Image (cartoon, helix red, strand yellow):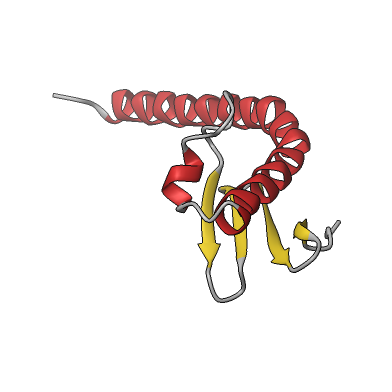
Amino acid sequence: MATAKTRTRKTRLWFWSILLVAVLLGAAWLAWGEGLRKTGGAGVAYAARVGCSCRFVADRSLDDCAKDRLAGMELVSLSDDAAARSVTASIPLVASETAAYREGYGCVLQEWRD
């Protein structure tokens, strides 16, 4: 039978284990996530413009355009808005950019927000 002292020790061990995991996950996110945020903005901007050109200039389906992704762009997802003639590329919780087709200009990115 467990005593109060044993339960307290187990509770304390459980608390410190959870805290250690949380700290390690936070440190990993800061180390890896910071680089992802810096390069993610440029990556999604590139994907949005290329995806928009593929979708509205080449008149291909978005699924067909997704096949042309470069290596390392697996986290980027594309979605289109046929009414606005635009494609949005995003990395969830990191970055999102939209490029819209303009007659005479092709696909251009929306104004960047800092």
Report which quarter residue 44 is drawn in: top right
> Is residue 40 toward the left or the right of residue 69 in the image?
right
Q: At x 74% / y 29%, what residue is drawn?
A: 35
Q: At x 50% / y 44%, what residue is drawn?
A: 65
User: Relative to 97, does residue 94 appear above or below in the rendering?
Assistant: above
Q: Quadrant of the N terminus?
A: top left
> Is residue 94 toward the left or the right of residue 68 in the image?
right
On the image, the x and y values in percent for residue 13 come to 42, 23
On the image, the x and y values in percent for residue 34 come to 74, 33
**Front position in the image: 17 or 4:** 17
User: Relative to 103, does residue 54 appear above or below in the rendering?
Assistant: above
* Number of numbered discs on residues: 0
On the image, the x and y values in percent for residue 20 come to 54, 24
On the image, the x and y values in percent for residue 54 come to 59, 48
Report which quarter residue 101 is drawn in: bottom right
Q: At x 63% / y 55%, what residue is drawn?
A: 57
**Front position in the image: 113 or 17:** 113
Residue with the most extreme left position: 1
User: Relative to 19, does residue 110 appear above or below in the rendering?
Assistant: below
Q: Quadrant of the C terminus?
A: bottom right
**Front position in the image: 5 or 99:** 99
Q: At x 45% / y 32%, what residue is drawn?
A: 15
